[in-house]
Amino acid sequence: MGKKVAVINDLSGFGRCSLTAAISVLSAMGVQACPLPTAVLSAQTGYEDYHCVSLTEEMEQFRRSWEKMEARFDGIYTGFAADEEQIGHMIHIAETFHKKKAFLLVDPIMGDHGYKFDIFSIEFCRKMRELAKMADIVTPNLTELCILTDTDYRMIENMTDEKHLLTVIRQLAENLRKDGPRTVVVTGIQFCDNEDGIQKMGNLAVTGKETHLAAFPYVGGSYSGTGDLFASVLAGGLARGENLKSMMELAGSFIEKAITDAVKEEIPRNDGVEYEKYLHMLMK
């Protein structure tokens, strides 16, 4: 029987992100993506102008329909929620389908570069903490890690020493783990490698038993959808029964190639990266 992952996220016409990224990545990995759209957008929210149709009222109907079908999933993977009510629906869906053999991966989309996205309220962030507590694995960026742990981002934004920075991030991740998620993977950590002096971009996994840093040369640029690509590779790997370390390395290599091309071709950051040509890297 093929592996299935329920993907709860938005569908954006432009930006190469969210469900567009998740469906293509999971499919390349031989995993069936079962999408539950939270909203349909003309373009992702980083564009100056976009139209958004919220599907809040439909989410419970999806859950009921899947429950009547006696649907079974190998994993549940949540992403963009338009408001706190949608997070409530995500929690209800997880309570229904998050069984012993199914993982729950939460990508807690709330902000970036030290700022909470304007469309989200304080109550939204509180509700996201509630969802994150249920997760087997949560994938915040640094900003989202600070929001989830009620930490001032300014405490870490100017840190230049690699060891000190990673130690602080590791401790914040451990603090988050105490609240519930078994594994925290902090994404998009930019630092200067003390050994070779090269600027790197890394992702740090904290599991309780160990930590693992997967880092690659920083090639510049911050692009729409790269966090979705990373989380999607992890979700696909978990569904295939592969270990977290190898999936982090694979995701990093995959995304690094796509970003390198985007920088060379001067692709606008809102357009995302041309990852499609590298999907073969994910096939098994």
Image: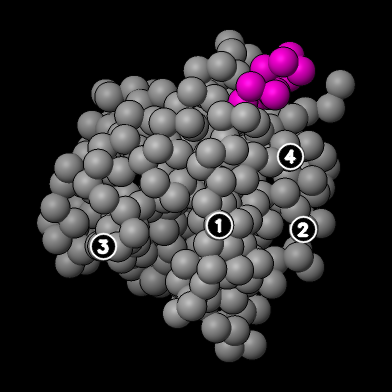
Dot 3 falls on a residue whose secondary structure is: strand
Give residue 174's quadrant in the image.
Answer: top left
Residue tagged 4: 33
Give the mark nearest the N terminus, 2 or 4.
4
Earlier in the chain: of badge 4 and badge 1, it is 4
Residue 115, disc:
3
Residue type, mark 2 in image = Leu
Q: Is residue 112 left or right of residue 264?
A: left
Distance (Cα) linking label 3 and label 1: 24 Å
Give the residue displayed 58% in from the left and 62% down from the top: 41
> In this view of the protein, can residue 223 be seen by the observer?
no
Lateral position of residue 139 relative to residue 55, left or right: left
Q: Going by the image, does 145 lie left or right of 248?
A: left
| Mark nearer the N terminus (4 vs 3) | 4
Residue 64, position as x, y percentages in the image: 64, 22
Residue that badge 2 annotates: 279
Q: Hey, which quadrant is residue 115 in on the image?
A: bottom left
Q: Give the range drawn in magenta.
A: 63-75
**In the image, which is nearer the foreground, mark 2 or mark 1?**
1
Spatial CA span between label 2 and label 1: 29 Å
Eye-nearest disc, 3 or 1: 1
The foreground one among 253 and 78 is 78
Residue 66 in magenta? yes
Going by the numbered disc 3, the residue's amino acid type is Tyr
Q: Which circle marks residue 132 in the picture? A: none
Q: Is mark 1 on a helix, strand or loop?
A: strand
Determine if residue 127 is in view.
yes
The reply to whether the C-beta atoms of the residues labelled 2 and 3 are less than 8 Å apart is no
Q: Is mark 4 on a helix, strand or loop?
A: strand
Q: In terms of sequence position, does the residue under pointer 3 or pointer 1 come before the other?
A: 1
Question: Which residue is the extreme one toward the top?
Answer: 100
C-alpha distance separating marks 2 and 4: 15 Å
